[in-house]
Amino acid sequence: MKHILFLAICLLVAGSVSAQTYYYGPRHIHRRPVQRQSNDDFYQPRIGIEGGLSIANTVSSYNSNYSTNSILGFNAGIVAEIPLIYPLSFEPEVLFSQKGYQANTTDGTLTQRNDYIDVPLLAKFRLVRGFNFLVGPQLNFPVASTTTFNNGFNTSSESYYTNTSNKSYVAGVVGLSIDLNQNVDIHARYVIDLSSNEQDANSPIPSYRNQVWQFGLGIKFQ
């Protein structure tokens, strides 16, 4: 009797489960497709700002015995990034940049500080994601210049020095940048004049080319 009762209960449970399956239908497990978000916005044009530290000095063009020391300055301005074809972008900039040098002479210390508006026209190559190589020409537009001389007792200076022969207008740029995220990068560059200034033949200062190491931070917006 117990066996018959147990068998009846099993049949009743099996029938109930079967009926529910028939009524509601088989359950289907719906899995949401995995959405892969891409952070690679290479083809998104952007504009931004940048600024940083400059370490400026000179390269003497015709006098290997003439040596100068570096001076510190800063650079700041606006930048754009225009994608062309992967991995190449065009990166024009407009920067305020300080250049110059310091020279120790037998009579004292001379410091030349030149202010420029620089326009780098750079090709930007993405070597790997987040790591870029920069190279290109730069146009230099002189704004102002200050010459300071200290003989150990007195200091004299001349501002807004406008001798156009003391200027050079084209430079070359090479550098690297590292993307910290989609909008922020750090960069390092070397900038050198492609032509020397045409100094007065009677001047003790020989013809030279500006050279600048630039280290900075850039912020770009989409």
Image: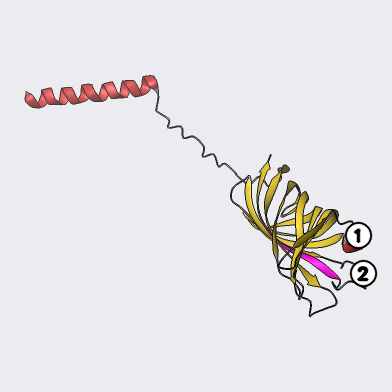
Side of 129 relative to 99 (left or right):
left
> Could you tell me residue 166's position as x and y percent?
88, 63
- Per the rendered image, the range of residues in magenta is 207-215
**Circle 1/circle 2 CB separation < 8 Å:** yes
User: Which residue is under mark 1?
Assistant: 163
Q: Residue at x 86, y 60 (%)?
A: 170
Give whichever of 151, 158 is nearer the camera: 151
> Could you tell me residue 215's position as x and y percent?
66, 57
Q: Quadrant of the N terminus?
A: top left
Q: Relative to 48, is 116 above or below?
A: below
The furthest residue to the left: 1
Asked where in the image residue 27 lies, by quadrant, the reply is top left
Give whichever of 15, 167 is nearer the camera: 167
> Could you tell me residue 85's position as x and y percent?
76, 51
User: Which residue is under mark 2?
Assistant: 200
Name the mark on residue 145: none
